[in-house]
Image: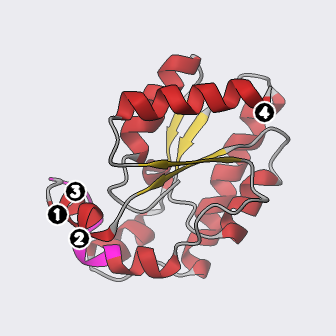
Amino acid sequence: MGVSGSGKSTVGRLLAQRLMVPFLEADDVHPAANRAKMAAGRPLNDEDRRPWLLSLADWIHEAIDDGRGGVVACSALKHEYRDIFRRAGVGVCFLYLALDRAAADQRVAGRAGHFMPARLVDSQYATLEPLRSDEPGLTVDASADPQTIVDDAVRALRETD
């Protein structure tokens, strides 16, 4: 979880490979209307996000139910969004990739071909509710090397087993 540009996709793919579980890029599940709205520079609201979050929760539920597990790269900016995922099944953990605004701006501005424009980074920080102590997971510095982040995440997951 984290704002745009925090490295969710990169870290998520690496983590899924390390754990040998399926990976889901939540951006690929956004309805066309959400993608168009963001591409036009308009931030999503809770109403826009709800069907998307529920479809991700369905994927999580199936991954837990059939025992395969998985990694989802998703902004999951609010506590209430993460609660939707936690209700999908036992064992859901979060990896919060914390990144300062200047670094996020720079990373998003440097991406080519992504529907999320850099001007929406501010709206993500306005929505962001960092991982709370009552939520299972780990907060890491997203400016660290992705492989180091994955190592820390795997270590934390092993400690919770």
Q: In which quarter of the image is residue 103?
A: bottom left
Secondary structure of the residue carrying tag 3 is: helix
How many other residues sit within 10 Å of disc 1, few (<14), some (14-19) or many (≥20)?
Answer: some
The location of residue 27, given as percent across then percent down, is: 43, 53
> Which residue is rendered at x = 48% and y = 58% of the image?
2
* Vertical placement of residue 48 versus 147, above or below: below
Mark 4, residue position = 64
Q: Which of marks 1 and 4 is nearer the N terminus?
A: 4
Residue type for callout 3: Arg
Mark 3, residue position = 107
Q: Which of marks 4 and 2 is nearer the N terminus?
A: 4
In 3D space, how far apart are the residues under numbered discs 3 and 1 (Cα atoms)?
6 Å
Observer-side mark, 4 or 3, equals: 3
Residue contact between numbered discs 3 and 1, judged by CB atoms under 8 Å? yes
For the image shown, how many numbered marks are present on the structure?
Answer: 4
Secondary structure of the residue carrying tag 1 is: helix
Secondary structure of the residue carrying tag 2 is: helix
Observer-side mark, 3 or 2, equals: 3
Residue type for callout 1: Ala
Secondary structure of the residue carrying tag 4 is: helix
Q: Earlier in the sequence, mark 4 or mark 3?
A: 4
Mark 2, residue position = 118
Q: In which quarter of the image is residue 92?
A: top right
Q: Which of marks 3 and 2 is nearer the N terminus?
A: 3
In 3D space, how far apart are the residues under numbered discs 4 and 2 (Cα atoms)?
34 Å
Q: Is the magenta stretch mostly helix, strand or loop?
A: loop
The range drawn in magenta is: 112-121
In 3D space, how far apart are the residues under numbered discs 4 and 3 (Cα atoms)?
33 Å
Mark 1, residue position = 109
Q: Which of 100 and 68 is in front in this view?
A: 100
